[in-house]
Amino acid sequence: MSAALKDAGFSKPPEQIVPFPLYGQVGTIRRCARELENIHGDVALHYWKRECRALAENLRRLGCDEEEISVQVLTFQTEVQVEMMRRYSQRLADEAQNDIHA
């Protein structure tokens, strides 16, 4: 490749693994939120730790560094909590709507 093409940004950049953003994986987030609504105590804690560890291990296998893994797991945790709050708010709104029509 000529120096002019390299200078213009046409050189091949080093390869980098970029994981698919977890906050975009709505199905996984909703599944975890749904499961956590139905379990409590040690069972819920065990499930949550297992999900987060599995996510971290998958990212590790993809070649992500520990900092990126930490960011992705924290983002996942936040998104699941937001989904749980959304679901709870929706249930409250549905109950209020049903009370109005009763």
Image (cartoon, rainbow, N blue to C red):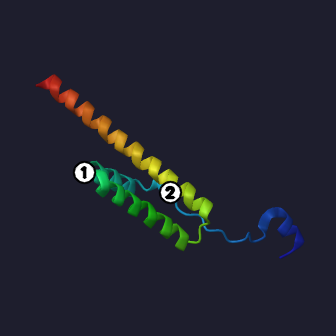
Q: Amino acid at mark 2?
A: Val
Q: Earlier in the sequence, mark 2 or mark 1?
A: 1
Residue at image coords 51%, 52%: 74
Find residue 38 and name its label. 1
Q: Position of residue 31 (x, y in %)?
A: 33, 55
Residue occupying image coordinates x 40% and y 49%: 80
Rendered image quadrant of residue 88: top left
SS at mark 1 in the image: helix
Give the position of the N terminus as an image quadrant: bottom right
Asked whether the beta carbons under mark 2 and mark 1 sit within 8 Å of each other, the answer is: no
Left/right of residue 91 with respect to residue 98 in the rendered view: right
Question: Which residue, as the protein is rendered here, is positioned at the far front?
Answer: 42
Q: Residues within 10 Å of mark 1 (few under 14, many from 20)?
A: few
Q: What residue appears at the point 14 percent right and 25 percent down from the top-left corner? A: 101
User: Does residue 41 appear left or right of residue 14 in this picture?
Assistant: left
Q: SS of the residue at dot 2?
A: helix
Position in image of residue 25 (x %, y %):
43, 56
**Residue 36 drawn at (x, y percent):** 31, 51
Question: Where's residue 4, x and y in %?
Answer: 88, 68
Kind of residue sitting beneath label 1:
Asn
Near-viewer residue (69 or 5): 69
Label 2 sits on residue: 73
Along the viewing direction, whichever of 20 and 35 lies nearer the viewer: 35
The answer to whether residue 63 is left or right of residue 49 is: right
The vertical placement of 65 against 29, above or below, is below
Q: CA distance from mark 2 to mark 1?
A: 22 Å
In the image, 17 versus 66, the foreground residue is 66
